Image (cartoon, rainbow, N blue to C red):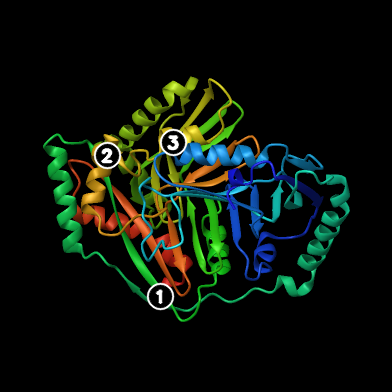
Amino acid sequence: MAADSLGDATRLLSCSLPCAGISWHNFLAAAGAQPRFYWADGAGKAFAGVGAAAELLAWGAGRYEAIKRQARALFHGAQHLPPVGLAAPRLFGGFAFSPDFTPDNTWSIYAPAWFVLPHYQLASADGQAWLTINAQIPADENPQDLIPDLRAALREKAAQLAAPAAAQQAPPSALSSIEYPMSFADWQRIVRAATGQIRAGALNKVVLARAAELRFAERLNLLPVLRQLATQYAGCYRFLFEPRPGYAFYGASPELLVAAQGRELRAMALAGSIRRGINAAEDRRLGEQLLGSAKERQEHQIVVDKMRQRLAALTESLSLAPLGISKLSNIQHLQTPIRATLKRESGALPLLEALHPTPALGGDPRPQALRLIAELERLPRGWYGAPIGWLDARLDGQFAVAIRSAVAQEARAWIYAGAGIVAESAPKLEWEETALKFRPMLDAHGADEI
């Protein structure tokens, strides 16, 4: 139920207990037929959730403001015992790429904005772990009367998760087939259409994406996929949003969109790509080639300039780190970290609204690029390329750009990959770049075995 539909009838009560030794894998594996959520920031902090204590949904151009209003209503008057920052209740969720997103078969259950407060939450960082229970209670109920029951439920849950049976790991799902809905001929046609418009001066850049459909012999088991991503892409922002069992959005994104805490903001411009080398010498040579490429640096600079421009009205100071390279298992990107001091503590949502989509996933100018994407791409993006992450009671949070991602529906999954198109783009090279970007999710699903 949306939080702002509850009025003053209920309020949120959360209770936490330390729970060292419980892994996120066992926590999610024990969920049964309940919603599941997961977030890891690549720096050792991880959150997971099971069940749903509250759901926030919104549609249309006002979706950021609507989620903000609902979140404030949910957390208004909330009590958390004990008041521990790491264990505090968090909303997991995100947004569709487009505000006018209409669910199709692939994205059948998704809304343009959807956040869930889990019933149970696991948080871990710096050797600490906390198990939290969140519950909506009648506004006239005395929280002290309910705390013993909540703590008893937490102890029971912790004992269940610590049992030997909870540590058993299900095998990966067997991948049956992979299909690519867009042919190279179609890709060539849309890239040439885009470069034609760019050269004519209609826009500077557009990001075009394509998809791959994976079919499995049975319902896809997501936990082996998440384990593989944790092994191969430990430094990425790994996420799972599974609001209905068997229907999930998940991935391992290298791209931070917003990390907001008080007046502190961190963000990242990530654009421009090349493969990794087969040895250290080739890897250095490819990295130097990437740094020296006028085409890749132009694409990257468009992202940097527009992010700085869009943040100007919200920040009192902003600094850019020197241009560098982010090296992942199979690909390397040009990267510019961004830090800023906000004019006021506004939370993450206004920042997401200002930035999404950056030219790294949309294009420049944004309106023209989005119109061209809608015209040229066959498949709706759904939540691909959009903000995914979490919000706390202050509406601070951390969000990645949902790339290197997949959406699963029972025994099928669709993975997405995009490429930035500028005037000098060649269809074959951009096709190869998207193939490179497919690899993390293909490998995580066992594509090398078929």
Q: Residues within 10 Å of mark 2 (few under 14, many from 20)?
A: few
- Tell me the SS state at disc 1: strand
- Secondary structure at badge 2 equals loop
- Asked whether 411 or 12 is in front, the reply is 12
Which residue is identified by label 1?
215
Distance CA(mark 1)–CA(mark 2)? 38 Å
The front one of 242 and 129 is: 242
State the image coordinates of residue 104 (x, y, percent, origin top left). 36, 62
C-alpha gap between disc 2 and disc 3: 31 Å
Q: Secondary structure at mark 3?
A: helix
Mark yes or no: residue 236 visible.
Answer: no
| Left or right of residue 36, residue 412 in this image | left
Question: Mark 2 or 3 closer to N-term?
Answer: 2
Q: Amino acid at mark 3?
A: Glu
Looking at the image, tell me whether mark 1 or mark 2 is earlier in sequence order.
Answer: 1
Residue pictured at 16% horizontal, 63% vertical: 185
Q: What residue sits 41% from the left and 56% below the top?
A: 330
Residue 353 is labelled as: 3
